[in-house]
Image: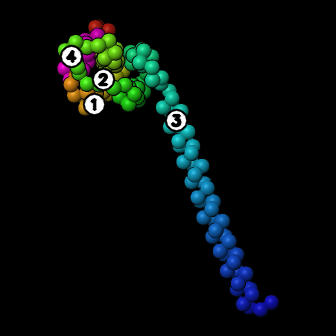
Amino acid sequence: MSHITLIVLCAAGVLLLIFALITLLILGGREKTSKKIEKAVVFKKKFSTDLEVMIVKAADTSLSDSELKELAALFIATHKLGSKTSKDLDEATKKKLEFVSSFASNANASATNVSFLNRELKKLSNSYKKEIDAYEQMGLAKRKIKES
């Protein structure tokens, strides 16, 4: 064999090795990403989006503060208060505001998370500011009664 053939074979081997490493890195990265996505999906499926179930979960004192924050974020993402059409609240809106009261009454909900829920709901439903504050205050009053 001549020196040129040997050099060509070595170059081809090096290129093949580089190609194999790049392929391994690309495929390895996809598997890690899909595992992260699967964990996120499992994490999000922890709570039901049914309003009645969410109200019960918001009052559940076995949930940690971080789990309650997840629940609040899920509520904000799935349940909208809409816009105010009259001075009287309809039953659907009252039920949604009951979640705020239930959440605020939970002893494990930090002030930060209660404030987060209040602030985000006000951003989405500016016309219900007074009602959101009122239901939060009712929940905090229930919380004080429970703690006494």
- Say which quadrant the N terminus sits in: bottom right
What residue is at 70 percent from the left and 84 percent from the top? 8
**Residues in magenta?**
129-142
Give whichever of 82, 17 is nearer the camera: 82
- Colour style of the rendered protein structure: rainbow
Question: How far apart are the two marked residues, 1 and 2, measured between alpha carbons?
Answer: 8 Å
Residue 41: which numbered mark, if any?
A: 3
Residue farthest bottom in this picture: 2
Question: How far apart are the two marked residues, 3 and 1, measured between alpha carbons?
Answer: 25 Å
Residue 19: which numbered mark, if any?
A: none
The crowding category of the residue bearing disc 3, from other C-alpha atoms within 10 Å (few below 14, some 14 to 19, many at least 20), is few
The correct choice, above or below, for 74 with respect to 139 in the image is below
Q: Are marks 3 and 1 in contact (CB under 8 Å)?
A: no
Tell me residue 86's x, y (percent): 21, 16
Residue farthest right in this picture: 1
SS at mark 4 in the image? loop
Q: Which residue is mark 4?
A: 86
Residue 124: which numbered mark, if any?
A: 1
Camera sees residue 16: yes
Camera sees residue 65: no
Tell me residue 116's x, y (percent): 29, 30
Q: Which residue is mark 2?
A: 81
- Camera-near label (1 vs 4) is 4
Of pointers 3 and 2, the one earlier in the residue sequence: 3
Q: Amino acid at mark 4?
A: Ser
Describe residue 113's horizontal placement relative to residue 66 as left or right. Answer: left
Describe residue 123's horizontal placement relative to residue 77 as left or right. Answer: left
Of pointers 4 and 3, the one earlier in the residue sequence: 3
Q: Amino acid at mark 1?
A: Leu
- Say which quadrant the C terminus sits in: top left
